[in-house]
Image (tube, helix red, strand yellow):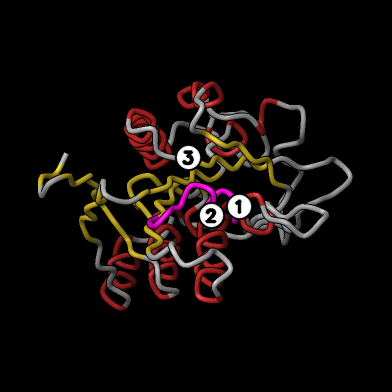
C-alpha cells in the first residue's frame, strides 16, 4: 500500500483548499451524479467493483443519497449518468464492465428510488466523460439541453471515480461553459468531495501484470480533486442552501 508518509507528502506539496458552498435558493442549482452504479460500488458486482466493503465508497453513497433527497425535496433538477457499455466495444485499459442490460450498469440500491422522481433525468453513457456521452447522432447534447432548459446557474457534481469519470466530466463542462456552449447562466461548477470516491488497487496486485495499473485510493482521490480545482471547479466539503440569509 502507499505509505501514509507518501500521502502526507503529496498533500503538503499540492495542498487542496476545500470550502463550504452556500447555494442560493434565488437561482437554480443542478445536481449531477456520475456512475453510482453496482459495477463500481457494490461488493462483488463485477470486474471493477470493490472486492470488500470500502469506507470511502460507502460514505460517498450515503452522502450522495442525502443530497439527492434534499434536491428532490426542493424540486431541483438532477441528472444521473450510468456507465453502460456494449460487449463488442471495449473501454481500454479496463476489462469488460457495466454491460448494457446487466445489473452492473444500474444504480446502487440506495439510489434506485431516483428512477421514479420527476425532477431526475437519467442518461446512460458508453464512455468516461458524461458530457461527450450525452451527445446524440444529430449533434445535440442531452446534458447541454438539460442545463439550458432548467436555467441552471450552479452545478454540483458527485460520484465515481473522482479522478476519472467525475474529473473528465467536470473538465469538459468547464471548457464548454468557457466557450459559451452552455448559455449565459451557468457560472459555477462545484465538486462535492464528500459525495465522490474512487477505487483502490494496491501496487502489490499489479506486480505481475501489465494490464492493471496501481491505483491507491486516497492518493488518487486527492489528485482528482486537485486537478478539478486546477481546471476552475470549486471543491466543497460542505454544502448548504441559503434563503433570506439563512443556511438550511
Residue 238, placed above or below residue 179: above
Determine whether label 2 and label 1 are within 8 Å by CB.
yes
Report x, y in % for residue 194. 33, 47
Give the side of residue 37 with respect to residue 32, left or right. Answer: right
Identified at 77% across, 28% down, the residue is 101
The range drawn in magenta is: 143-154
Report x, y in % for residue 31. 43, 45
On whether residue 147 falls in the magenta region, the answer is yes
Q: CA distance from mark 2 to mark 3?
A: 13 Å
Sort mark 2 into few (<14), some (14-19) or many (20+) by Cα contacts within 10 Å. some
Residue 47, placed above or below residue 16: above
Identified at 39% across, 40% down, the residue is 60
Q: Secondary structure at mark 2?
A: helix
Quarter of the image with the C terminus is top left
- Which of the pair 108/5 is nearer the observer? 108
The label on residue 145 is 1
Identified at 68% across, 40% down, the residue is 124
Report x, y in % for residue 117. 50, 25
Q: CA distance from mark 2 to mark 1?
A: 5 Å
The residue tagged 3 is 78
The label on residue 247 is none
Give the side of residue 61 with respect to residue 93, left or right. Answer: left
The residue tagged 2 is 148
- Which of the pair 59/180 is nearer the observer? 180
Nearer the N terminus, badge 1 or badge 3? 3
Amino acid at each position: 500500500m502507499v505509505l501514509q508518509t507518501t500521502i502526507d507528502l503529496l498533500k503538503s506539496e499540492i495542498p487542496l483548499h476545500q470550502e463550504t458552498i452556500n447555494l442560493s435558493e434565488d437561482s437554480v442549482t443542478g445536481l449531477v451524479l456520475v456512475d453510482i452504479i453496482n459495477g463500481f460500488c457494490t461488493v462483488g458486482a463485477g470486474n471493477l467493483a470493490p472486492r470488500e466493503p470500502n469506507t470511502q465508497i460507502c460514505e460517498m453513497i450515503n452522502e450522495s443519497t442525502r443530497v439527492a433527497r434534499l434536491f428532490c425535496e426542493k424540486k431541483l433538477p438532477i441528472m444521473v449518468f450510468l456507465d453502460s457499455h456494449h460487449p463488442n466495444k471495449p473501454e481500454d485499459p479496463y476489462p469488460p464492465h457495466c454491460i448494457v442490460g446487466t445489473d452492473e450498469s444500474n444504480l446502487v440500491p440506495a439510489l434506485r428510488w431516483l428512477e421514479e422522481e420527476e425532477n431526475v433525468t437519467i442518461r446512460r453513457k458508453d464512455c468516461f466523460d458524461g458530457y461527450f456521452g450525452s451527445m446524440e447522432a444529430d449533434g445535440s447534447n442531452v446534458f447541454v439541453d438539460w442545463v439550458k432548459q432548467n436555467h441552471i446557474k450552479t452545478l454540483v457534481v458527485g460520484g465515481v471515480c473522482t479522478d476519472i469519470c467525475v474529473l473528465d466530466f467536470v473538465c469538459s463542462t468547464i471548457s464548454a461553459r468557457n466557450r459559451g456552449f452552455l448559455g449565459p447562466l451557468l457560472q459555477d461548477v462545484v465538486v462535492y468531495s464528500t459525495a465522490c470516491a474512487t477505487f483502490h488497487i494496491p501496487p502489490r496486485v499489479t506486480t505481475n501484470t501489465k494490464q492493471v495499473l496501481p491505483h491507491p485510493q486516497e492518493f488518487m482521490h486527492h489528485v482528482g480533486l486537485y486537478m478539478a480545482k486546477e481546471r476552475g471547479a470549486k471543491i466543497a466539503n460542505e454544502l448548504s442552501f441559503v434563503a433570506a440569509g439563512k443556511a438550511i
